[in-house]
Amino acid sequence: MIDQEEAVMEIIVNAGQSRSLCFEALQAARQGQIDHARDLLRQADTFTRQAHKMQTRLIEQDAGEARQPMTLIMVHAQDHLMTSMLARELSEEILHLYQRDARA
C-alpha cells in the first residue's frame, strides 16, 4: 500500500520541477539557445514521467473502487501534474515559433 502523503508529495515535487524546467526552456529559447531549450524540455520530461508513474500507481491501487480517499492535497497534486503537462506542451509549441523566427 502506497503512503498517500508520500505519493502526493512525489507528484507535487516532480511536477513542479518539470514546470520550472519548461519555463527555463522558454527563457533559453527567447535568448536564441534552442538546443539548450530542447535539453531542458527533455529534463522536464523525466520529472513528468516520475510524477505520472506515481499517479498511475495510485490509480492502480484505487482500482476504480474509491479505495484512496480524495483529499484536497490529492486534488492539489493532480492540478500540479496537469499544469506541468500543459506547460510542457505549450513550451514545445512556443519553441517551434522561436525556432521559426530565428530562421527567418
Image (spheres, grey):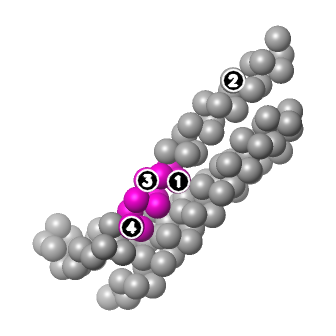
Task: Name the quadrant containing residue 65.
Answer: bottom left
Q: Main secondary structure of the magenta part?
A: helix
In the displayed orientation, state which residue is furthest to the left.
65
Name the residue beneath numbered marker 4.
Answer: 76
Q: Which residues are magenta?
A: 76-85
Label 1 vs 2, first from the N-terminus? 1
Residue drawn at x 38%, y 62% as measured from the top left: 78
Q: Are marks 4 and 1 in contact (CB under 8 Å)?
A: no
Residue 83 drawn in magenta: yes
- In the image, residue 68 sits, relative to residue 24, either above or below, namely below
Q: Nearer the viewer, mark 4 or mark 1?
A: 4
Label 4 vs 3, first from the N-terminus? 4
The picture places residue 52, in percent across and down from the top left corner, at 46, 62
Name the residue beneath numbered marker 2.
Answer: 97
Amino acid type shown at disc 3: Met
Name the residue beneath numbered marker 1.
Answer: 84
Amino acid type shown at disc 2: Leu
Label 4 vs 2, first from the N-terminus? 4
Is residue 33 or residue 27 the one in the foreground? Answer: 27
Amino acid type shown at disc 1: Ser
